[in-house]
Amino acid sequence: MTESTGRAIELANSLAALRIRLSTAAENASRKVEEIELLPITKFFPVTDIQMLAELGCRAFGESRDQEARAKIEALQRVWDWPADARWHMVGQIQRNKARSIAAWAATVHSVSSARVAAALDRGVAEARSAGHRADPLGVYVQISLDGDVSRGGVDVHQPAAVDALCAQVDAAAGLELVGLMGVPPLGADPDVAFAALAAELRRVQRSYSQRLGLSAGMTEDLEIAVKHGSTCVRVGTALLGPRPLTSP
Ligand SMILES: *Cc1c(COP(=O)(O)O)cnc(C)c1O
């Protein structure tokens, strides 16, 4: 058995196990599994892994750094059977000077925390559209900080006016589409309490919008709890691809 066949089998097994985990979580929460997107987070893993996931049916992938994502996308677009309908999500913190680049490759960003970044992404989408690099608006999850430590990203949940202002700005931007809220439990926090607070914030924000907003919540360690609180997108790296190296490749 070649090394790549071994890895393909490993990924097939972990994807199957993860799908079962997600359906069980949905069932326990009396929800339909089809309403929960399983987003593989492929940061630090090679393009060969991403190709294998695509062969297993995955069509969306999350990355956390602009430079790494760009390099991988360029490489994959040269692969003859790379699916044309594959989409990329940016899940990491966004530096304003990277917004233009991100707007050229991402279908969705999960991590918008400031008006400046939202404005820069909107300008980036306009440029990407006029250059013919994209047609659709950029889907935006506004990231919420549940403990006010905004250095880890997110708008402080205790400042609802700031959350509302950023959501309204995204919703009004020609190049952006508000698709929901995203949150990560604070370090050391009880995820059950954290996701309950995030879900409550989503219910509050939802009242101002006619489109159904989503909830990007849950990772390898806590996806069941996130599903219980209404997650519509779980972002899973480790459970699918294994432990990440401590440093980037
Ligand atoms: C890396 C990352 C994930 C995946 O985390 P795992 O615990 O490996 O599943 C999810 N969301 C974000 C924002 C990440 O940066």
Image (cartoon, grey):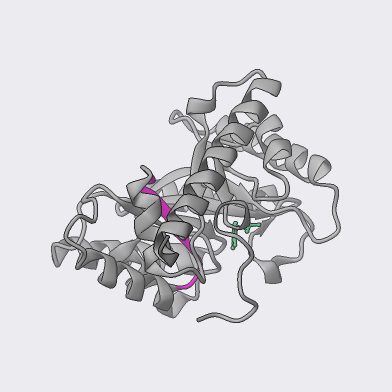
- Return the x and y of residue 55 as percentages of the image width and height: 33, 48
Judged left or right of residue 21, residue 176 is: left
Most foreground residue, 208 or 34: 34
Q: Quadrant of residue 103?
A: bottom left
**Residue 42 included in the magenta stretch of the image:** no
The structure residue drawn at horizontal position 21% and vertical position 64%, both measured from the top left corner, is 79
**Looking at the picture, does residue 175 appear above or below residue 104?**
above
Q: Is residue 180 visible?
A: no
Q: Is residue 112 visible?
A: yes
Q: Which residues are magenta?
A: 58-65
Residue lying furthest top = 30
* Residue 60 image point, x, y percent: 39, 49
Quadrant of the image occupied by residue 205: top right
State the residue lying farthest toward the front: 1
Task: From the viewer's side, name the closer residue of 144 and 67.
Answer: 67
Q: Residue at x 50, y 35 (%)?
A: 213
- Where's residue 246, x and y in %? 65, 78
Considering only vertical position in the picture, is 205 above or below 54?
A: above
